[in-house]
Amino acid sequence: MKHPVRVLACLALWFLLGGAAWVQFESLPADGSPGMTVTGLLRLPEGEGPFPAAVLLPDCDGISPHERVWGVRLVEQGYAVYLIDSFFTRNVEQTCGEAPDVPVMDDLRGAVAKLATLPEVDGGRIAVIGWQDGADVALAWAAQDGPGMAVVFYPSCPSPAPLGRPVLFVLPSDYSGYEACNAFVFAEHEAGRVAVQRIAPYGVGAGYDCESCEGAYLGGPGGWNEPADALVNDALYGEIQRLLETP
């Protein structure tokens, strides 16, 4: 279970890597009611923008070194990375095994809208990247029409709606949602509404990409697998770029 001190320490470590700043935004409820102010950490790559951007949505255990590592990887690939913390803002430690009572989708809408206003960001090239519970939110966002695309790491695919945005699915063969999500990928491919792609590392489960999560990853069983992590990492960025540029 994460505690606020651990979350702040994790974010501080990422902040010390340089080029990061706290950026607030207003959460956007679907009913148009006022949303609360949420804080995220934005880190820009070296060079001159505008840059493509990635919004990171953690799993049910909130921000961990898992997302920080992926954030560093994405910045090194030239992405502006916005790590939003829906849990700490609301004094919630984690929601694993519980019915989520954190409006992550509202926060996601607000974060994407905020990024699109920044001169350093290319508002037409925003990728929403989520892990497990965060992936389900990203998948629901991708069911809506609009610019951008989603990357979903081991989602559960709970009755997913038809896609309106391109999606890259990362589906380890040994996690619980593999069969349902794999069937959904093929159905969406056959429908041909938007571009979909799948990376399916074999013999690993949820959390295969988290070296620092041994005994601490609450989202599902499994463990870090270096070959699978390297395989997906090598393939991921080219696919994101391709899908962001797909009409």
Image: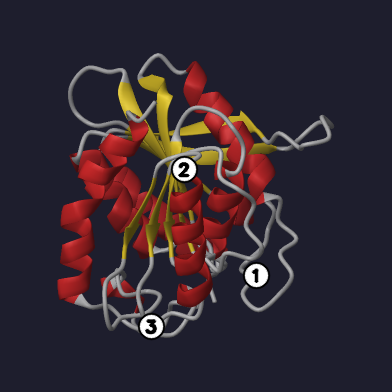
Please tell me which of labels 1 and 2 falls first in the chain: 1
- Asked if marks 3 and 2 touch (Cβ < 8 Å), the reply is no
Crowding at mark 1 (Cα within 10 Å: few <14, some 14-19, many 20+): some
Q: Is residue 176 above or below residue 14?
A: below
Residue at horizontal 22 percent and vertical 67 percent from the top: 229
Q: Is residue 232 above or below residue 190?
A: below
52 vs 32, left or right, is left
Residue at horizontal 62 percent and vertical 37 percent from the top: 144
Q: Secondary structure at mark 1?
A: loop
131 vs 170, left or right, is right
Q: Quadrant of residue 111?
A: top right
Task: Residue 85 in the image: state x and y as whole percent.
Answer: 55, 50
Q: Disc 1 residue type? A: Thr
Image quarter where the N terminus lies is: bottom right
Crowding at mark 2 (Cα within 10 Å: few <14, some 14-19, many 20+): few
Please tell me which of labels 3 and 2 falls first in the chain: 3
The mark found on residue 174 in the picture is 3
Marks 1, 2: nearer the viewer = 2
Task: Residue 4 in the image: state x and y as whole percent.
Answer: 55, 62
Task: Give the alpha-carbon distance from disc 1 to disc 2, as whole Å.
Answer: 35 Å
Q: Which residue is mark 1?
A: 95
Q: Which residue is mark 2?
A: 192
Residue at horizontal 68 percent and vertical 58 percent from the top: 91
Q: How is the structure coloured here?
A: secondary structure
Crowding at mark 3 (Cα within 10 Å: few <14, some 14-19, many 20+): some
Marks 3, 2: nearer the viewer = 2
Q: Secondary structure at mark 2?
A: loop
Numbered marks: total: 3
- Asked if marks 1 and 3 touch (Cβ < 8 Å), the reply is no
Q: Quadrant of residue 47?
A: top left
12 vs 103, left or right, is left
